[in-house]
Image (cartoon, grey):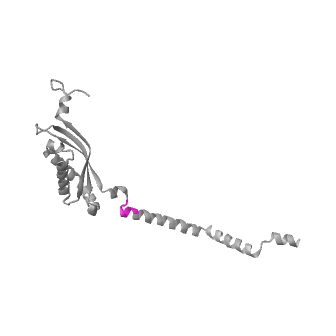
Amino acid sequence: MAEREKEEKPSEEEASKKSKVGSWGARLRQPLWICVLVGTTVVAHGLLIMVHALTGSSAENTEGEVSLGRFGFMNTVDQHNSVVKADFQLHVRLLDQIDKAARKLLTDRKYRVQQDVEELLRRAHGADFEDPSLSELKRQLQETVNQSLELRAVDEVIITELAIETRQRQANDTDSGGHRLAR
């Protein structure tokens, strides 16, 4: 029987280890520790979100490119030029040094910028759209946007989705009586 008691009774070392683990586990079960742990996690996540928002580290802010919208050109004056109409998306790349300030100005002066670009396009000529790189038109657009913002903020003008209608295509779309053909 004495041997059985020895087998059933754990050694003092084992009992000490079990009691330490058991008491630590019991402490964790107390509501105070759980509240502290959850509270710390919530505060840490909140701080991370706040730092992320304040540093503006989203992809939209780091690109430096801003879309100004869809614009169009209609050649009503220059009958000698082959470009009759052009539609395109206009984007600008802002200077890195003043990206945030320029974005705020673009938001604040959105309609002024739009109006100034539209006025420039009403003064434009069909020949401005015949240049494959559109370099002169882009230079004028850059100057116009910078003047609207009263700040040298635009590093580059980007034109996408350009659709040009020429007099030749327009002539092909009409019958001999000058009426537009349905397509």
Q: Looking at the image, is 157 positioned above or below residue 1?
A: above
**Residue 2: x percent and y percent?**
87, 73
Return the residue found at the far front: 132
Marker count (numbered): 0
Q: Residue at x 17, y 32 (%)?
A: 168
72 vs 28, left or right, is left
Seen from the viewer's position, the closer of residues 169 and 147 is 169
Q: Residue at x 15, y 41 (%)?
A: 126
- Asked whether 46 falls inside the magenta stretch, the response is no
104 vs 136, left or right, is right
Q: Main secondary structure of the magenta part?
A: helix
**Residue 123: x percent and y percent?**
13, 46
**Residue 115: x percent and y percent?**
19, 49
Seen from the viewer's position, the closer of residues 157 and 110 is 157
Query: To which quarter of the image does residue 20 belong?
Result: bottom right
The answer to whether residue 115 is visible is no
Q: The C terminus lies in which quarter of the figure?
A: top left
Q: Looking at the image, is 45 positioned above or below residue 144?
A: below
The answer to whether residue 154 is visible is yes
Return the residue found at the far right: 1
Q: The N terminus lies in which quarter of the figure?
A: bottom right
Q: Residue at x 58, y 69 (%)?
A: 33
Bounds of the magenta span?
A: 52-57
Query: To which quarter of the image does residue 82 belong?
Result: top left
